[in-house]
């Protein structure tokens, strides 16, 4: 470990920039995990959330330690209809299609209902939830770290940024998961976000980049409107 980095202003600037970027890119993961754990009992949901974020941290650090291999993932390995696709592209495509399927399936269940008595859906298997979290963690980890490469020269800074960002995400994920659980209508909004993120990942996979700023701005605006709706409903019922 290079202790001289502690006294370099550029290193601290890189750390702050990378941490902020990791937190922003982690929003997708937080929303996905929050939606999944909402189908589990409170205790198991908290444990699944902890395991999911811990796995995300492990994947990101592991990828940082094999940067040379990770950079190789961006080299084309297959050509389809004249479009060269790398392993990263294929991972993004698979992850995006999975998110689209998962979000569409959950939206369908929410719209169709689960019986005339309005009972809650059957609680999902803890193992199945963890398996899905692992799949998406891998996708988001690859995308996040590939994006981070080039923003900092030292792996130590990247690892520190990832650890700090995951700590912030862990604190935020509890509040988000709790909010979704207390206000069921927000789950549909979260699923719509996941559908949009899935489409963006598929687009990235085929070489059409959708600036994340557009997506996050739309998400923030929609979330703000939903918060206003929740506040209005609470006042009417209170």
Image: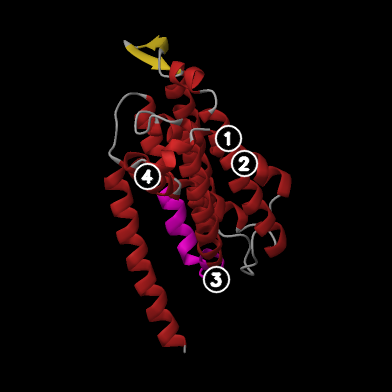
Q: Is residue 161 visible?
A: yes
**Tags 2 and 1 in contact by the CB under 8 Å rule?**
yes
Residue in front for this viewpoint, 94 or 158: 158
Question: Which mark is nearer the camera, 4 or 2?
Answer: 4
Residue 24 is one of the magenta-drawn residues: no
Mark 3 Cα shell of 10 Å, populated few (<14), some (14-19), many (≥20): few
Label 2 SS: helix
Main SS of the magenta part reads helix
**At x 47% / y 66%, what residue is drawn?**
185
Q: Is residue 48 left or right of residue 57?
A: right
> Please, is residue 121 above or below residue 2 in the view?
below
Question: Which mark is nearer the camera, 3 or 1?
Answer: 1
Whichever of callouts 4 and 1 sits on the residue coming sooner in the sequence is 4
Whichever of callouts 4 and 2 sits on the residue coming sooner in the sequence is 4
- Judging by the rendered image, the residue that carries numbered circle 1 is 59
Whichever of callouts 2 and 3 sits on the residue coming sooner in the sequence is 2
Whichever of callouts 4 and 3 sits on the residue coming sooner in the sequence is 4
**At x 54% / y 23%, what residue is drawn?**
66
- Per the model, the C-alpha gap separating discs 2 and 1 is 6 Å
- Judging by the rendered image, the residue that carries numbered circle 3 is 182
Quadrant in the rendering for residue 80: top left
- Per the model, the C-alpha gap separating discs 3 and 1 is 31 Å
Number of the label disc, if any, that sits on residue 173? none
Residue 91 in the image, given as x and y percentages of width and height: 49, 26
Question: Which mark is nearer the camera, 4 or 3?
Answer: 4
Residue 189 is one of the magenta-drawn residues: yes
- Judging by the rendered image, the residue that carries numbered circle 4 is 12
- Judging by the rendered image, the residue that carries numbered circle 2 is 55
């Amino acid at each position: 470990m290079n202790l001289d980095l502690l006294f370099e202003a550029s290193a601290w600037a890189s750390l702050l920039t990378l941490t902020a970027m990791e937190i922003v890119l982690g929003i997708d993961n937080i929303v996905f995990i929050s939606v999944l754990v909402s189908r589990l009992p409170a205790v198991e949901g908290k444990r699944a959330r902890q395991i999911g974020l811990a796995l995300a941290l492990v994947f990101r650090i592991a990828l940082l330690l094999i940067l040379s291999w990770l950079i190789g993932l961006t080299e084309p390995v297959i050509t389809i209809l004249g479009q060269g696709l790398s392993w990263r592209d294929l991972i993004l495509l698979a992850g995006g299609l999975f998110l689209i399927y998962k979000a569409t399936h959950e939206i369908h269940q929410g719209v169709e209902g689960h019986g005339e008595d309005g009972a809650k859906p059957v609680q999902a298997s803890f193992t199945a939830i963890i398996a899905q979290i692992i799949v998406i963690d891998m996708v988001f980890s690859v995308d996040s770290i590939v994006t981070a490469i080039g923003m900092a020269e030292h792996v130590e800074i990247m690892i520190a940024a990832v650890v700090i960002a995951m700590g912030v995400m862990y604190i935020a994920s509890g509040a988000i998961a709790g909010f979704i659980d207390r206000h069921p209508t927000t789950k549909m909004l979260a699923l719509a976000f996941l559908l949009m993120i899935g489409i963006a990942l598929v687009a990235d996979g085929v070489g059409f980049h959708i600036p994340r700023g557009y997506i996050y701005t739309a998400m923030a605006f929609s979330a703000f409107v939903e918060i206003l709706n929740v506040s209005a409903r609470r006042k009417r019922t209170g």
